[in-house]
Structure formats: structure tokens, C-alpha cells
Amino acid sequence: MIDLHTHILPEIDDGASSLEEALTMMALAAEDGITDMVATPHCDFRFDFDPERCGEQLKRVRRLCSHVPRLHLGCEMHLSVENIERVVAKPQRYTLNSGDCLLVELPDMFSAAALEAGLKACHRVGLRTVIAHPERNPNLQRNPAIAVRMMELGCYFQLTAQSLSGTFGAAAKKSAARMLKQRLVYFVASDCHDIDQRKPELRRAYNAIADEFGESTAQLLFVLNPRAALQSRELVRPAECRSTMRRILNSANIFSKERMWSAIS
């Protein structure tokens, strides 16, 4: 599994408080089956995101933990006028693995016009906006139609794994379930911050989604789409999952029709 949203870099934001905690978080992630983690420090009014400093911390952690999970760099960009100006000027300083996907945190309150203008500004410079934990946003909880409109604008939703178990409250859990049923979700990530309350764990959420929506959907949300985001490749919506996988398997010509359908159902 690939964890696209983590706060694992030590002494950068409100995530890992020390190098020791960061290394323990990586060990927990490896035990959970996570092969790759993207360090996504906050870029907001409270924490100033410095790519160079974060890059040095990333190298420091890598030197002491050369095994899996592999580490990549990105940021969690709070959607504000100042941050949009930064991103438009130098997009790859803020994207996931210096590619074309930008992890965006929405403000708790926003106007539809301001939201659309900010997202379109990012899209105009060739970025794909990955919306972090939309199920936890009060506006989207109250107005589900906003989520559909954001998808129409070209956004991709990333749920928090712990939202599925109710850690972030009943409203977030209900919103997460609704988005999954509407096939609006492209990624599930841990948004881990520590080794106690917000650990780097994905397996429990993976199993829950596999049980309800099938193994192919779980693979898409936890492995295939996150990998595609890191490599700036095409992302697949779960509603298209069966037809896309059927096309891939047909082109590979390695399964009989019966075995092919059993593999993706």
C-alpha cells in the first residue's frame, strides 16, 4: 500500500516531534504493509513550508531507515490566496514527488466562487488537485452537492483511513461512506501525525473497503491510484474500475474470459 498523505518528517509541523518518533512511525507503517509514504508537511497560516528544509529532513530519515517504506516529498497546501500565488509561480515545489498532483486542504468555510477560482488557478498551470480529507470538511458534510461539483471541476478526493472507523466523528464517517458509495474517492491515506492517536495505518481501512466494494476497488484506492499520482500517470475513478481492469487484462491476453472476470470481481 502507498500512503499519500503523512506528517512523518520530524520537527517540521504538528507531526512527528522527533527523529525517533519518525523512525517508529515508519516501522509501524512497514508492519501494516505500507511500502511507500509521502511526507506532506502543512503549508498554511501556522506552518511555513520550506521545500529545502523538508528535503534535508527527508534525506536524514532515509539515511537511518534505508528499508521500506520508501519516502517521497510533497506538502499539504491550505487553499488560500497566498498559497495559490506560490503554487502558480513554482508548481513543482509543492506537488507530490515533484509531479503534477497537488495535495490541497480546504478551509473549513469558503464561498463557492472563491473555491472554484482557486482550484481553476491550479488547474491552469497543469496541476491535478487532490483534495485532502474532504469527508472532514464541515461545508462538504452539510452540502454533498459541492463534492460532486468539485469532481466536475477536475478534483480527486483522498479520504482519511480513520474516518471510516469513526475516529473523526459520526459526521465524517457518514460523509466518507457516502463518497465511497458515490464512487467519488480516488485515494485513501492515513494522514498520520504520531505513534499514538494518529498512527500510519491503512490495513484496517483496506480490508473494510475490500469487504464492501471488492478487492479491485481497494487495490485502486490504496495502491494503483497512489502510484499513478507519484508517477504523474492517469488516475482511475472506482466507477470505471471494472471496465478499465478488463481492458488491461484483455490487452495483456493472459487470462481466459472466466479467469479474467473472477480476478476483478
Image (tube, grey):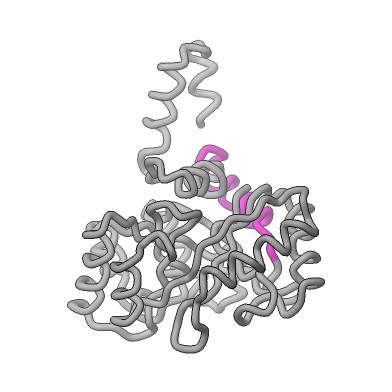
Question: Foreground: 248 or 50?
Answer: 50
**Nearer-the-camera pick, 88 or 135:** 88
Would residue 93 appear left or right of 196 to someone viewing this image?
left
Left or right relative to 100: residue 72: right
Q: Nearer the viewer, residue 38 or 165?
A: 38
> Which corner quadrant of the image does residue 155 belong to?
bottom left
Q: Is residue 216 magenta?
A: yes
Q: Residue furthest bottom?
A: 46
Q: Position of residue 233 (x, y in %)?
A: 40, 41
How many marks are shown on the rendered structure?
0
Image: 190 above or below 221:
below
Q: Is residue 239 left or right of residue 34?
A: left
Residue 189 falls in which quadrant of the image? bottom right
Identity of the residue drawn at 51% across and 41% down? 224
* Residue 42 % position (x, y): 51, 76
Query: Looking at the rendering, which quadrant does residue 238 occupy?
Result: top left
Taking the spot 70% from the left edge, 68% from the top edge, the residue there is 199
Magenta portion: prevailing SS class = helix
Can you give x and y, in whole percent of width and height, for residue 18 in the image? Answer: 76, 77
**28 relative position to 214: left or right:** right
Which residue is found at the position 76% from the left and 52% from the top? 30
The span picked out in magenta is 200-217
Residue at the spot 37% in from the left edge and 30% down from the top edge: 243
Q: Position of residue 244 (x, y in %)?
A: 39, 31
Viewer-nearest residue: 118 or 48 = 48
Q: Is residue 44 magenta?
A: no
